[in-house]
Image (spheres, rainbow, N blue to C red):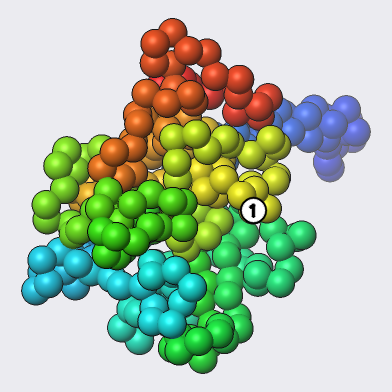
Amino acid sequence: MRKRLGFTLIELLVVIAIIAILMAILMPALRRVRDQARQTACMSNLRQWSVTFNTMGADSDGKFVQGAPGALNPAYYWPWMLPENLKNWKQNKIWFCPTATKPVTEQNTENMNIFNAWGINRDTAGSIPAPAIGMNGSYGLNSYFVPIPASSSYQSGVSGADGWKGLFDVKQAATVPLMCDSLRFDLWPLPKDAPAANEGAAWGDASHMARCCINRHSGSLGMVFADGHARKTGLKELWVLKWYKTFDTNGPWTRAHGNVPNWPAWLAKFSDY
């Protein structure tokens, strides 16, 4: 009887089919593991920013950052005022969520998507000390933490008196956003701000809430709060957080008083608050 030296074609096809089935089973699990690793790294970055801000504010009543001098608005361009080692995005890797590491400049916004980092690679008018290498990142500060005179207003029109004067006197700090995934470094959300009409249009949206209502982490975004804890935050949850002292957490985009918000289709499937 002749000895067989290899597999038959049928046997090879069966083996290939089994491998394909196993890969189909394993790939979603591997994707979940990868996404979870990115989420963990994102939360770690945000916690480090919280530690950094607390350290900077320790000797100045919690005031960890100022707006840049010469700007049109007194709270503009806060990253320019950071120490050099912090604003250097090439050295300071905690500027970037692992899901969004490729910067797009202000002049090239038509190609921006939620998995791009923001980028400002040009000098600005006035006496703002712009970094020579520009500024890049994928997180945004709750800019109501940038102190301005009570008689002034933030870009959103909110009175300076309603901003947070520092990290150490924030009431119910666990509900106050400090920093989060964002398409801009500055955030001034309002209760009436609408989300982007479609998932890819957030960058060009005038709504500051739309700039951070971005689906980078499976229906959520990374956020660190004023008390220092970081967690995944639901996209619709953004409207029930206390962005500034008088922010209405029962606004038109919440379930308060039996209201049913008219969410855009891409956002409707996620949990309500």
Q: Is residue 129 visible to us here?
A: yes
* 185 shown above or below 105: above
The N terminus: image quadrant = top right
Q: Position of residue 105 (x, y in %)?
A: 65, 71
Q: Which sits in the foreground, 183 or 187?
A: 187
Q: Residues within 10 Å of mark 1 (few under 14, many from 20)?
A: many
**Residue farthest to the front?**
151
Q: Position of residue 40 (x, y in %)?
A: 38, 49
Q: Is residue 15 visible to us here?
A: no
Q: Position of residue 51 (x, y in %)?
A: 21, 63
The C terminus: image quadrant = top left
Q: Position of residue 29 (x, y in %)?
A: 54, 34
Question: Which residue is located at x 46 percent, y 51 percent?
Answer: 156
Question: Which residue is located at x 47 percent, y 63 percent?
Answer: 185
Q: Which sits in the foreground, 183 or 217?
A: 183
Question: Which residue is located at x 50 percent, y 87 percent?
Answer: 126
To which quarter of the image does residue 24 belong? top right
**Residue farthest to the top?**
258
* 198 shown above or below 50: above
* 184 shown above or below 170: below
In the image, what residue type sits under mark 1?
Answer: Trp
* 84 shown above or below 191: below
Q: Which sits in the foreground, 54 or 232?
A: 54
Relative to 185, 44 lies left or right: left
Q: Which sits in the foreground, 108 or 259?
A: 259
User: Which residue is tagged 1?
Assistant: 203
